[in-house]
């Protein structure tokens, strides 16, 4: 009986030995399938191709469309096939990714299968689903691909960031701004690091204060403030009971709107009311949906949503009511399901007004609107007859370019009066290209954390770069949210290097945060002693808003099991490569260990510097992998690597005759004798950590005088 066991799953959440982005690394025991070439398994290739026809798009090592199919036909093995099937299942679930690897380990029958991922829960589910699919294909048993894909899509939907947050994240990624989801299950995202970070939650930023949200939430308070600021708003007031509601309606003249004080998504809102009975009845329904009730003058026209970001109106959408068209056979209830609900089957339930189709869940206002038109849910409209089932916009078109400048100005004023840096401004008017004052139009509502989907996926018109606008507001041109981040790796001397380097960088009072084997330190404050989770430690110091400079230790064992805890470094230090951790994660050779430690060099920013030990050939050879500058340190002034570096005008920290020199090209400046360096507590006076710390501080931009001062402490 064919078997294939997943022995271990490692989620490498940061840059790693395989790639500079997150990957899943699975250790797989092929068992009896170890020698099962695909071209020798009767019916296997045919089953796989028919179940997953999208595999034809996989280029594989052939480098062309159908490349993977060619490999199948020539004969390939289960680990390689598992890689591609896992990637294809991710694609079918909505995550289109192309990177994967399958490599043998020194243990017979054990392979490493590697695939790129966006969502941890989904990729693990895809891997396990791929295993089940492959076993069915090898055994000639049926497999319900449609059911499996539906299951995976449901997982992707549950765990995904919402479209508003994702638009912001995509814009940040395009700008090279680092981001991290702070907790699974919610759309709270950190953009940038440390003291330069910003945070967003859906379309709300860390500067959206509670007072501003309260103002937007309270429709009566919003109207009062906007009126005082000269913004056109409807007449109205808060009311206490049905009698008061009718008194208000009479005083401002019908038709009127009755709605909850804190109305949201149009729930409990009744519009165009003219009779006393309508107003009195609507009061109770509106009160059920909020903490109070407002009566205001009905504004004729069409609903518009304007998006204000900072001091600019970025996008505008015009909404139309939800309408079903009769066919002479089906009830309104069934028409809603077939005509309105089907279009949202793949959407997020919280963003689709028709995700709830049970009549018991429908809004009272919807039922009353139908009643006013002479219908009920069970009415059967004539063929071609149009029936409005919701007044509030469910179908939107882009009208950004049509908005009159004065309406743009009113929208920006309204958002600033409320104190919202991202605001959805609801405008009702007949013509958005004409000033509101000329057509009895008005701003009727402000929305904190507005839904961006209508601007990202309009039914008609241009898609607007709303995510980009938000990122440009949070990070003006030239800013990427990064703080100086220094990574240190090596077999010996990391802890001493980091202790000394921390001291050198703290000379000017900078808040230097450290994640190392000593623990976690934020400035002078020790948060954890002896931290063992380097990934969590790095994430922690980069999350802390006090951190101005971050120093992160990256041991080989942590790189192999977790990846790096940061995506880029301004200074990457490699001390040496030894055999201490050989055998970990099936790493058996010194060259493989060197590749793991080289991850630090791979992620040096173009504006950064790789600091390398010229006396270790494996480390010196990493210089070509740096996208930034390279600086060497050496205990031998005649080291050929150091000599060549200086000949090219490069920088080298040299120990010569017991004295540390800073050299750049032909220039040499004595810093201090090695024997006079005040070592950190517990640190031995070894040359490599001292030279590395000096070189890293110099690469970071610390002046010669400050370095000398720090060494003497």
Image: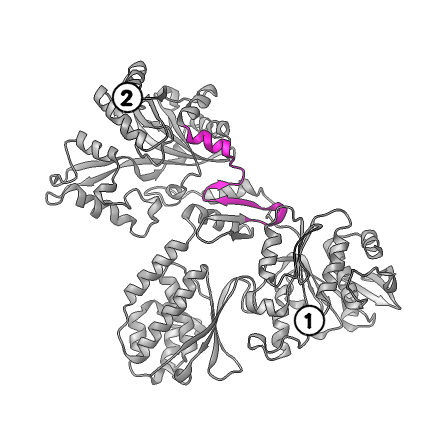
Residue 257, image quadrant: top left
Q: Residue at x 40, y 75 (%)?
A: 81
**As drawn, is 461 to the left or to the right of 11?**
left
Residue 423, image quadrant: top left
Distance Cα–Cα, label 2 vs label 1 = 78 Å
Which label was assigned to residue 21?
A: none
- Confirm whether the magenta stretch covers residue 695: no
Q: Tell me where the magenta segment starts and ends, as one range.
A: 191-218
Front in this rendered view, residue 667 or 239: 239
**Residue 341, placed above or below residue 25:** above
Front in this rendered view, residue 378 or 470: 378
**As drawn, is 45 to the left or to the right of 475?**
left
Tell me residue 125's x, y (percent): 39, 65
**As drawn, is 315 to the left or to the right of 359?**
right
Residue 47, image quadrant: bottom left
Badge 1, how many Cα within 10 Å: few under 14, some, many 20+? some
Which label was assigned to residue 242?
A: 2
Front of the two marks 2 and 1: 2
Q: SS of the residue at dot 1?
A: loop
Q: Residue at x 26, y 27 (%)?
A: 282
Q: Is residue 275 visible?
A: no
- Confirm whether the magenta stretch covers residue 216: yes
Q: Earlier in the sequence, mark 2 or mark 1?
A: 2
Q: SS of the residue at dot 2?
A: helix
* Residue farthest along the front direction in this orientation: 529
Tell me residue 493's x, y (percent): 73, 67
Q: Which residue is mark 1?
A: 491
Figure quadrant of the N terminus: bottom left
**Residue 107, placed above or below residue 142:** below
**Residue 85, placed above or below residue 379:** below
């Amino acid at each position: 009986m064919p078997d294939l066991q997943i022995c271990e799953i490692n989620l490498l959440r940061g840059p790693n030995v395989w790639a500079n982005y997150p990957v899943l690394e699975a250790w797989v025991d092929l068992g009896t399938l170890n020698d099962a070439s695909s071209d020798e398994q009767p019916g296997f290739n045919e089953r796989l191709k028919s179940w997953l026809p999208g595999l034809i798009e996989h280029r594989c090592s052939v480098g062309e469309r159908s490349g993977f199919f060619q490999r199948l036909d020539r004969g390939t093995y289960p680990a390689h096939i598992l890689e591609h099937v896992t990637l294809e299942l991710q694609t079918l679930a909505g995550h289109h990714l192309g990177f994967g690897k399958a490599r043998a380990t020194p243990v017979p029958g054990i392979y490493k299968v590697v695939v790129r991922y966006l969502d941890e829960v989904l990729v693990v589910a895809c891997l396990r689903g791929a295993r089940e699919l492959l076993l069915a294909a090898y055994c000639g048993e049926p497999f319900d691909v449609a059911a499996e894909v539906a299951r995976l899509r449901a997982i992707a939907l549950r765990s995904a960031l919402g479209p508003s947050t994702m638009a912001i994240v995509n814009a940040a990624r395009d700008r090279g701004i680092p981001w991290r989801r702070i907790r699974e299950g919610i759309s709270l995202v950190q953009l940038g690091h440390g003291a330069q970070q910003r945070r967003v939650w859906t379309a709300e930023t860390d500067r959206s204060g509670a007072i501003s949200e309260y103002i937007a939430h309270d429709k009566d308070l919003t109207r009062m403030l906007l009126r005082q600021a000269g913004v056109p708003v409807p007449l109205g007031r808060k009311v206490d009971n049905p009698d008061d509601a009718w008194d208000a309606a009479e005083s401002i003249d019908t038709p009127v709107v009755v709605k909850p004080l804190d109305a949201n998504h149009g729930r409990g809102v009744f519009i165009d009311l003219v009779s006393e009975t309508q107003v009195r009845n609507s009061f109770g329904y509106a009160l059920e949906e909020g903490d109070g009730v407002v009566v205001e003058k009905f504004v004729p026209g069409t609903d518009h949503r304007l998006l204000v970001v900072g001091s600019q109106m970025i996008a505008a959408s015009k909404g139309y009511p939800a309408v079903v068209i009769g066919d002479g056979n089906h009830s309104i209830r069934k028409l809603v399901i077939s005509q309105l609900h089907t279009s949202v089957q793949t959407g997020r339930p919280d963003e689709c007004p028709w995700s709830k189709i049970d009549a018991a869940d429908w809004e009272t206002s919807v039922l009353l609107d139908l009643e006013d038109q002479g219908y009920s849910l069970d009415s059967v409209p004539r063929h071609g007859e149009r029936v409005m089932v919701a007044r509030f916009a469910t179908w939107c078109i882009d009208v950004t370019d049509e908005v009159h400048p004065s309406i743009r100005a009113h929208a920006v004023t309204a958002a600033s009066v409320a104190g919202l840096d991202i605001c959805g401004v609801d405008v009702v008017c007949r013509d958005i290209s004409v000033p509101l004052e000329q057509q009895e139009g008005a701003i009727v509502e402000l929305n904190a954390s507005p839904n961006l989907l209508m601007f990202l996926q309009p039914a008609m018109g241009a898609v607007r770069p709303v995510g980009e606008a938000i990122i440009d507001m949070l990070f003006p041109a030239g800013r990427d949210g990064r703080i100086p981040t220094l990574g240190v790796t090596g077999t010996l001397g990391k802890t001493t290097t980091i202790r000394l380097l921390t001291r050198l960088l703290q000379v000017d009072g900078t808040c230097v945060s450290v994640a190392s084997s000593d623990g976690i330190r934020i400035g002078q404050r020790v948060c954890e002693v002896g931290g063992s989770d380097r990934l969590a430690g790095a994430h922690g110091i980069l999350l802390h808003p006090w951190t101005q400079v971050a120093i992160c230790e990256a041991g080989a064992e942590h790189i192999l099991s977790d990846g790096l805890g940061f995506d880029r470094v301004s200074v990457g230090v490699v001390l040496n490569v030894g055999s201490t951790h050989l055998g970990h994660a099936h790493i058996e050779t010194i060259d493989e260990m060197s590749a793991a430690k080289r991850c630090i060099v791979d992620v040096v920013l173009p504006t950064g510097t790789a600091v390398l030990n010229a006396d270790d050939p494996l480390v010196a050879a990493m210089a070509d992998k740096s996208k930034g500058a390279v600086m060497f340190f050496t205990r031998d002034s005649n080291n050929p690597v150091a000599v060549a570096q200086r000949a090219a005008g490069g920088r080298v920290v040299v120990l010569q005759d017991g004295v540390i020199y800073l050299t750049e090209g032909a220039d040499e400046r004595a810093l201090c004798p090695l024997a006079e360096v005040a070592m950190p507590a517990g640190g031995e006076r070894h040359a490599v950590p001292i030279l590395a710390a000096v070189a890293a501080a110099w690469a970071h931009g610390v002046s010669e005088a400050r370095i000398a001062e720090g060494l003497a402490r």
